[in-house]
Amino acid sequence: MLELTNINSTFNLNNGVKIPCVGYGTFRTPADVAEKAVKEAIATGYRHIDTAAVYGNEEAVGKGIKDSGIDRQDLFVTSKLWNTNRGYEETKKAFQETLDRLQMSYLDLYLIHWPANQKQFGDEAAKINAETWRAMEDLYNEGKIRAIGLSNFMPHHIVELMKTAKVAPAVDQIEVHPGWPHTEEIKYLQAHNILVEAWAPLGGQGAEVMSNPTLLQIADKYQKTAAQICLRWILQQGVLPLPKSVHKERMVSNQQIFDFELTDEEMRKISLLPNLGGQCADPDEVDF
Ligand SMILES: NC(=O)c1ccc[n+]([C@@H]2O[C@H](COP(=O)([O-])OP(=O)(O)OC[C@H]3O[C@@H](n4cnc5c(N)ncnc54)[C@H](OP(=O)(O)O)[C@@H]3O)[C@@H](O)[C@H]2O)c1
């Protein structure tokens, strides 16, 4: 933890690939805004960009990256396979379409966005996830992706996936913010050497996180904002936050989380906050 000194200090993935410890999120960044926002985010220092096919902005994200003037190999780019493209052949096809939209020859990280669940697919769910993962493994072995991982997979989905997987997932990107801490899942993932990435680290759009009195009180102590407290709380758990903002001053302030340290008591207090809103989606219950 202590060796992380700025957003581009790295975590090591389980295959040795290094990943900048804070990523820039692009969910709900419309295509007509994303090019400028991504270029600006890179100019303010971000080198790790998180997008997904379903965000509808991969093309603009790719242009923003190209316009940034930073060499491709100095950036870490993640995208995700959308739910309508699961299965072996479909995954390979969707991956190539993602690369084409981004105008890239490889990805640093590719994730299965959501597990196929029993609610929608019954007994077929496990098989669909296994076939999707087999395509991810092949793309990885072909050198088209530097690391492969999951998103919104809970421990029981991973146990099931590992029955057939040949490559262990490097990452699981799950919802983590005050009021939705996923403490037990983080413990499980870290024990299995899977890096946890936190989506909606600030609670996402419209959550009460940023106005929570406990967070504001702790923020006041350190002369920080509630957003910075959220991000620091995530990072101090060894979890990688992916804050999104289209505003330059927030892009910058979301990076200023390395010059203070929360006490164990503050960490515990934040972890125990009641639900403060956010998506709080249960991957076994979603029907998209
Ligand atoms: N894997 C998944 O299923 C999944 C799901 C959701 C998200 N994600 C990824 O995780 C990233 C982050 O999640 P998210 O975008 O939902 O939520 P988030 O980063 O928690 O919150 C974004 C919201 O907070 C505002 N904001 C940002 N910085 C702020 C600050 N310093 N002070 C006050 N408000 C601030 C943003 O507004 P402005 O932009 O107007 O500043 C936006 O409304 C996404 O962008 C995406 O890359 C993944």
Image: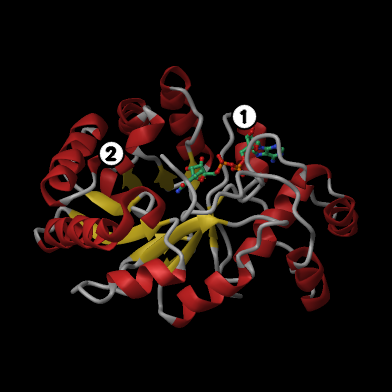
Residue 247, labelled with which disc? 1
Q: Between 43 and 127, which is closer to the camera in this rendering?
A: 127
Disc 1: residue Cβ within 8 A of ligand 1's nearest atom: yes
Residue at left offset 82%, top offset 68%: 269
Structural distance between the alpha carbons of marks 1 and 2: 32 Å
The residue type indicated by label 1 comes to His
Q: Disc 2 residue type? A: Thr
**Frontmost residue, 43 versus 272:** 272
Looking at the rendering, which quadrant does residue 18 occupy?
Answer: bottom left
The C terminus - image quarter: top left
- Along the line of sight, the residue nearer the viewer: 230 or 159: 159
Residue highlighted by disc 2 = 84
Residue appearing at x 78%, y 67% in the figure: 272
| Residue shown at 22% from the left, 61% from the top | 127
Q: Which quadrant: the N terminus?
A: bottom right
Taking the view exactly as shown, the residue that stands out farthest to the bottom is 191
Residue 12 visible in the displayed image: no
Looking at the rendered structure, the number of numbered marks drawn on it comes to: 2
Q: Secondary structure at mark 2?
A: helix
Give yes or no for contact between labels 1 and 2 (Cβ–Cβ under 8 Å): no
